[in-house]
């Protein structure tokens, strides 16, 4: 940590390329090392970074494991994550070492909910199948029965995890005249539930067996890892469609692919995967799945706002103020 005038300038290491305006401001405010080449850091490089930095700014692509944190020096006091999910950070190890963790909630909610709706429309309406046929020059013209899909209006959507993003999906689904259902560890306050006209299911299995669509919007934690395992996926109705814009590990991907292949589940829209950026080859072979490269928050507006949150959290740290987006481990 260096000092210019009255201001303390923490040593900040950023693991990936961030929007230009954010990097410029970081350079103005802090003693920052950027990653302009945007090459992901290997484990050894992450260890070297935590041994040197006062503040590390990682993203979802960095595994900040207990081993990495074991290499941290006493100077590392803050992990200011660029992103809402912190499942790639060993929170217990960070806590034990007295390292605070902040994230960027709230600013990517609406964009992630929009992308969820895009998938929720794309799969039943077969949008990408149509596009592929047209671009391949295989469209011979309109016919009354070509590429018929299913409407979403009037269908039941079961949202797993009803935090900020889940609620934003619920508001959109309501506008599309879907019936909103949800499962969450703790039930929403009556007023919010009423506004969303959402039906609560304490028992996830019960909800799964009754829905037309499932949208996964919960964080990845020890409790939600493979929450949708093979047995649970089998509870879905054969016409059901699964949308995941949260984390791949919440679903048993292999089981999902198997069940879609044999027609026990109708399809899926996935923006996240278990082994990103590797995609299970079984999924790639299925027609009725739409696969996107983890782009839920990929708008300029969201990414700049995420960067601004990172800046504010580091500034609060440097000024010894309360960290606005401190993640308190359970
Ligand atoms: C981010 C996300 O792009 O914020 C999250 O948790 O999943 C994404 O929208 C990514 O995490 C950036 O680190």
Image (cartoon, rainbow, N blue to C red):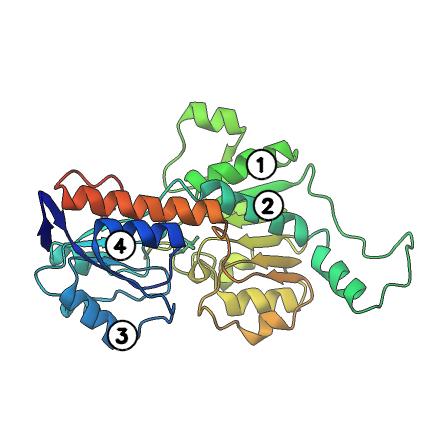
Rendering coords of residue 316 (x, y %): 19, 41
| For residue 178, above or below residue 88 | above
Q: Judge whether residue 183 can be spotted in this image.
A: no
The residue depicted at 69 percent of the width and 36 percent of the height is: 154
**Front label number (3 vs 1):** 3
The image quarter containing residue 71 is bottom left
- Disc 2 marks which residue? 117
Left or right, 320 with respect to 62, comes to: left
- Disc 1 marks which residue? 172
Left or right, 206 with respect to 137, comes to: left
Q: Earlier in the sequence, mark 2 or mark 4?
A: 4
Q: Earlier in the sequence, mark 3 or mark 1?
A: 3
Label 2 – label 1 distance at C-alpha: 7 Å
Q: Residues within 10 Å of mark 4 (few under 14, many from 20)?
A: few
Label 2 – label 4 distance at C-alpha: 37 Å
| Element type where label 2 sits in the image | helix
- Disc 3 marks which residue? 43
Q: Earlier in the sequence, mark 4 or mark 1?
A: 4
**Front label number (3 vs 4):** 4
Rendering coords of residue 267 (x, y %): 64, 59
| Element type where label 3 sits in the image | helix
The residue depicted at 51 percent of the width and 66 percent of the height is: 253
Label 3 – label 4 distance at C-alpha: 25 Å
Residue extending farthest front: 5
Q: Earlier in the sequence, mark 3 or mark 2?
A: 3
| Element type where label 1 sits in the image | helix
* The N terminus sits in image quarter: bottom left
Left or right, 148 with respect to 75, comes to: right
């Amino acid at each position: 940590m260096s000092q210019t005038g009255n201001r303390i300038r923490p040593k900040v290491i950023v693991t990936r390329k961030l929007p230009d305006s954010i990097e410029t401001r970081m350079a103005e405010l802090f003693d920052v090392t950027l990653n302009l080449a945007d090459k992901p850091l290997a484990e050894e490089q992450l260890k070297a970074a935590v041994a040197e930095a006062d503040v590390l700014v990682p993203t979802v692509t960095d595994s900040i494991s207990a081993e990495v944190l074991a290499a941290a020096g006493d100077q590392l006091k803050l992990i200011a994550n660029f992103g809402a999910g912190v499942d790639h950070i060993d929170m217990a190890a960070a806590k034990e070492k007295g390292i605070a963790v902040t994230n960027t909630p709230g600013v990517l909610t609406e964009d992630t909910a929009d992308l969820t709706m895009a998938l929720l429309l794309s799969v039943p309406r077969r949008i990408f199948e149509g596009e592929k046929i047209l671009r391949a020059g295989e469209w011979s013209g309109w016919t009354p029965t070509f590429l018929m899909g299913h409407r979403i209006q009037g269908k039941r959507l079961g949202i797993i995890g009803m935090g900020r993003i889940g609620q934003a999906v619920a508001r959109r689904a309501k506008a599309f005249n879907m019936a909103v259902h949800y499962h969450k560890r703790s039930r929403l306050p009556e007023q919010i539930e009423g506004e969303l006209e959402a039906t609560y299911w304490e028992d996830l299995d019960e909800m799964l067996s009754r829905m037309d669509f499932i949208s996964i919007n919960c964080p990845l934690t020890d409790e939600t890892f493979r929450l949708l395992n093979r047995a649970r996926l089998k509870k879905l109705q054969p016409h059901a469609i699964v949308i995941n814009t949260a984390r791949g590990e919440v679903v048993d991907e292999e089981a999902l692919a198997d069940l879609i292949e044999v027609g026990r589940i109708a399809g899926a829209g996935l923006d996240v995967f278990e082994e990103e950026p590797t995609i299970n080859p079984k999924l790639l072979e299925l027609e009725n799945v739409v696969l996107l490269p983890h782009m839920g928050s990929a708008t300029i507006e969201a990414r700049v706002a995420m960067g601004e949150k990172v800046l504010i959290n580091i500034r609060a740290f440097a000024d010894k103020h309360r960290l606005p987006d401190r993640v308190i481990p359970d």
